Image (spheres, rainbow, N blue to C red):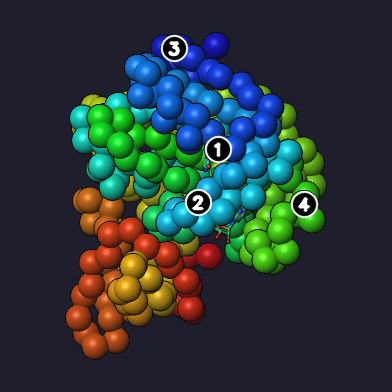
């Protein structure tokens, strides 16, 4: 057991198969479930990503959601901070070089190994976390497979899903405690250490807006700062990054 006892995972609902762990946890939150409640499923039949995109969730992956009741559920920094907690835990438990692509994609060997979906319904936010732990990439839909990987596919060995869940809950618990105690900048600095976006030439799509340029930094709110070819600096909150070229970090 971790000490001090963590907030996250004090109550854990384990399911074999659900549509989406986020949906089930929203229902529990509306009925008064406490902060830190977790729903985890072996399989999701309607897992989703951002903007209504689908999230393939076959057996072998870690699919779970955490209920948070922060003072500002819409704070965009939350997702970045959670990504730090998850990425660090995955690195420790698997030894794999898991990185973050802005804002909170989990990337391994240039492919997506996991994702984070923050759904804000004040007064709560549900953080859904999906990681291809022992997933055989062949079990992913063909259009997803070519850009996806799993921890097992890269490291050549399977991890115990319960151990990975415990490690990730510890990791997210720690960054959430940092959020509560106002040491957000320290965690964003760890985000910078783990990211593969800064220093690259990128295309960022946010709704109808498309920005091309060099990703310079994130600001104190977690927005991405991009130096455009026209010399103008753009600030983007939320969106999808495609890395076009560039050195800097791997
Ligand atoms: C995400 O969205 O990356 C957030 C994914 C969150 C999933 C968790 S699982 C537990 C909880 N319950 C849910 O219902 N969801 C959360 P986004 O950045 O929009 O990425 C979605 C895109 O990733 C899709 O359009 C596919 O191209 C790709 N994709 C789908 N399934 C994948 C998988 N298993 N591995 C890698 N890429 C995948």
Q: Is residue 238 above or below residue 68?
A: below
Q: Secondary structure at mark 3?
A: loop
Q: What percent of the width, then of the height, locates residue 202? A: 41, 75
Residue 231: quarter of image: bottom left
Can I make out residue 163 in this image? no
Which quadrant would the N terminus be assigned to in this image? top right
Q: CA distance from mark 4 to mark 1?
A: 18 Å
Q: Is residue 62 above or below residue 181?
A: below
Q: Residue at x 47, y 54 (%)?
A: 52
Q: What percent of the width, then of the height, locates residue 218? A: 29, 58
Beta carbon at label 2 within 8 Å of ligand 1: yes
| Residue mark closest to the camera, 4 vs 3 | 4
Residue 20 marker = 1
Q: Secondary structure at mark 4?
A: helix
Going from the N terminus, do you reach mark 4 or mark 3 first? 3
Residue 139 marker = 4
Which residue is tagged 3? 5
| Residue mark closest to the camera, 1 vs 2 | 1
Beta carbon at label 1 within 8 Å of ligand 1: yes
Residue 49 marker = 2
| Residue mark closest to the camera, 1 vs 3 | 1
- The total of numbered circles placed on residues is 4
Q: CA distance from mark 1 to mark 2?
A: 10 Å
Q: Secondary structure at mark 2?
A: loop
Q: Residue at x 72, y 54 (%)?
A: 140
Going from the N terminus, do you reach mark 2 or mark 4 first? 2
Q: Residue at x 35, y 24 (%)?
A: 30
Q: CA distance from mark 4 to mark 3?
A: 36 Å
């Amino acid at each position: 057991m971790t000490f001090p006892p963590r907030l996250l995972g004090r109550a854990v609902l384990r399911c074999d198969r659900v549509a989406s762990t986020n949906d089930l946890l929203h229902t529990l939150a509306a009925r008064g479930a406490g902060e830190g409640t977790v729903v985890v499923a072996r399989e999701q039949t309607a897992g989703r990503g951002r903007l209504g995109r689908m999230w393939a969730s076959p057996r072998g992956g870690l699919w779970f959601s955490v209920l948070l009741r922060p003072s500002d559920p819409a704070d965009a920094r939350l997702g970045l901070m959670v990504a730090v907690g998850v990425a660090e835990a995955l690195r420790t438990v698997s030894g794999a070089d898991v990185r973050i692509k802005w804002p909170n994609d989990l990337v391994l060997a240039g492919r997506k190994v996991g994702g984070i979906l923050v759904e804000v319904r004040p007064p709560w936010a549900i953080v859904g976390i999906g990681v291809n732990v022992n997933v055989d990439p062949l079990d992913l839909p063909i259009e997803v497979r070519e850009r996806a990987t799993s921890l097992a596919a890269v490291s050549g060995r399977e991890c115990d899903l319960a151990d990975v869940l415990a490690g990730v809950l510890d990791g997210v618990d720690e960054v959430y405690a940092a959020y509560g105690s106002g040491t957000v900048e320290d965690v964003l600095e760890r985000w910078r250490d783990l990211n593969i976006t800064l220093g690259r030439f990128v295309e960022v799509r946010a709704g109808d807006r498309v920005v091309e340029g060099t990703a310079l930094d994130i600001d104190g709110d977690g927005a991405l700062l991009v130096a455009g070819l026209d010399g103008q600096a753009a600030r983007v909150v939320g969106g999808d990054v495609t890395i076009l070229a560039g050195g800097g970090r791997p």
